[in-house]
Amino acid sequence: MMARLTAAEAVPSRRRLPASALRRRQLAVSAWLYLTFLAVATILAGTFVLAFMASLKVDPLERPFRLYFDQLNPAAWIAAARLGQEGAGDALWGGFSPGAKVDFSVTYAAPVGTTIVEPNAEIPRRRPGSGIAAALMRDYAADYASIALKSSSSAVMQVRDEETGVWEEWQTRTFVYEITYRTDRRNGPWIERTPLNLTAPPSQTLIDSPISPSRSERRGRLLSWDNITPGALGLIFNNYRRVIKETADLQTGKSLFGSWLVNSLAIAIGRLVLTLVVASLAGYALARLDFRGSRLLFAALLFSMTIPAQVTFVSNYLIFRDLSLLNTPWSVIVVFVASANVLLMKQFFEGFPREIEEAAIVDGANRFQVFLKIVVPNAKPALLVNAILAFQGAWNDFFWPLVLITSPPEALTVQVGLLSLRRSYGGAQGDWGLVLAGAFISIVPVVILFVLFQRHIVSTQVTKGIT
Amino acid sequence: MSRVSSDERSGWLFVLPFTISMTLFFVYAIVRTAYYSFTEYDLFTAPSFVGLSNYTTLVSDELFLIALRNTIGFSLIVTTVQTVLALALAVLVNHAVRVRGLVRTVFYLPSIMSSAAMTLIFLWLFQRDGFMTAIVSTVLAYRRHMLLFFVGMAALQGALVLNARRSYEGVSIFDPFFLLAAAFGALALIVACALAGLLPVFDNDLLISWLNTQRHFLFMPVTLWSVALMNIFTTVPTLMLLFLAGLQSIPSALYDAAEIDGANAFQRFRHITVPALRPVTFAVVTMGVIGTLQMFDQVAILGDAAPLASRVTLAYYVYESAFPAGASSRIGMASAAALVLGILTIAVVYAQKSVGVKERAE
């Protein structure tokens, strides 16, 4: 409760607040606290939710920022699945393959008195996205597709004028186009995307189509769709598919983002194994065994945790250069000094009962046998926590891969890869859908790990903080 | 005796891998960095000894001085704000909420994500025509509404409190129940005024350069303020949970006893909460100082999205000197700057430690 009035200010004739009022005040206090907490949680989660929504959008920088668009609209998912099914028999990822027969209907509206003309429809020879993907594109839907008007029908609808509030009668016309894979090209390839352009006079407005146009140009005259046969997932996760497919190596055509993920995984697993071995051995020795130099080693351990990697990287870079191990995953795996992990293991072993080991030693086992047979099997919780931390640290590591792996492009890790994504696509007019999709893919392994082992990580974060 | 020597031998064997890694990649590396700081070296021809000239060049290098200033400013701001904010939030929600399950996951999410992914998300938020700009622009558009809300709320609260004080004693000016009522009242007032068309909306087409700018605010470039905002956003939730864990380990009997003795809320905070949280606070500040003084990833990811002088930190200066784009390496300068960074970190950590220890002894 808040500060009370001092007695001097109070006039004697006044009463104290009744108990029910005090109770109300207590409830109000908790209401404020919950509101604060809710606000914090909303800001926190909201940022990620918004960024994720933006990563699905065609243009994440659009203004005003819409909260409801095709990628979040179940009706559009169903339409996209139908179009994908008709285009390539694949309702999930869509495409355009021989035998395709796609119905695409668009409805225009105009005030009474204006005639609605048939829009000029074409399958353009458009390159997708930017940069590398355009260079890799071989087959264009334009060369294999033919488009024809199948039918058209008219109707009227009521429109309320925003300014006067009067209901007006507008006419509408629906055009159904049929896009077919040309019969003279029966052995043609599967094509990922089927773009479509519709040009119509600005007096008529598009009011309905199965999926919304990707952009409108020339003051609404030209409406263009990047892909009218996306399939449901192809519509929703278009940017995610693009980030995998469009960051490709020019020579081999192999996905760069894919190999970055593989590299990161290899490095993270390598470092996990190495860290577990090094940290459990050293942690056990520092906790249990009395040997000369242990104090010095422990001091060095604590000291190394405060010194930034920038102080040591020149020498380490030279070591790996002299061993010709630059640009290999080995350098990034080995270079890390696992001080924090050793500290964690040491703390765990200090709370580990000594009696069992003593008994085994009396029975004639040597230290290493004791360690392997008795200590390690009983240290599973600590080893698990250490494994998670090591994996997460290695996966998220940015500095060492940046210094030690610079070329070729497919040798990078995913974090450094994100930097190159940023450089190529993350400008003021950049392709932010691609950048955000890349960022979200890169956090998936760590988030999975976290959700699976949440309790363990949380408890260590606390212990890590206290020490 | 044989037991001791066997411990000695197996001890050394057990720590051998760690010792090798520590010696080679840490101790030897620092010694070499120290050596290179007295030489001129470009990674290819043999280093030549130049004495202290790297250090004298460093002191007169404008970019280095900017980097030093940026680093210290950034560290000071971020460490202070994140610690205070996390503590305040923890104290605030301590008795109201038990953070569990999914909510806890949400709170940890920013801190388990890589700095690269986090920075990209923030870069998107901080585009010139991005979401942050949209928020500011909305606030400006509805400034009348907000002004009316606060004025209305203050007026209502004043009226309610004065009215209650006429017949009751002990009604605080911030009485929470009246505050809630006043907030709802003010909200209703705004809705009514807006529906009646009395409140204008100021349309604007704002573009704000959060990152790509040379402007300064106080002693730090605007770019780094944006990065500081992101850092605070990333760390506060986790630090708040740390403080919460600390708070929940304080026995509530202490507070009850103090309340009986007549201590008010602030006195209880000052004399019970603060001392009990000292170890956690010490850890949080230490982690904060170490983390912020070596801030590198965010600056590197920003790259050409912001001018060098607006984003450079010491750690980045070191990297940039060692691997400059399109120029030959200046390892001597990089090493000298690296040593400055290392010594600065140690000095701050130990200064903070001695202060913490002294306060604990009191």
Image (spheres, grey):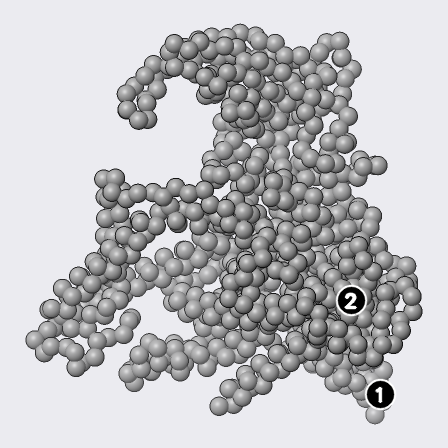
Residue under label 2: A313
Q: Residues within 10 Å of mark 2 (few under 14, many from 20)?
A: many
Residue drawn where x is 76% and y is 12% of the image? A185
Residue A1 position in % (x across, y down): 29, 71
Considering only vertical position in the picture, is B275 above or below B92? below
Residue under label 1: B5
Q: Secondary structure at mark 2?
A: helix
| Residue A321 shows up from this direction | yes
Residue A252 position in % (x across, y down): 83, 36
Residue drawn where x is 59% and y is 75% of the image? B286
Foreground pick, A113 / A422: A113
Residue drawn where x is 71% and y is 65% of the image? B317
The reply to whether callout 1 and callout 2 are in contact (CB within 8 Å) is: no
Q: Residues within 10 Å of mark 1 (few under 14, many from 20)?
A: few
Considering only vertical position in the picture, is B290 above or below B212? below
Q: Secondary structure at mark 1?
A: helix
Residue drawn where x is 73% and y is 72% of the image? B58
Q: Amino acid at mark 1?
A: Ser
Q: Amino acid at mark 2?
A: Phe
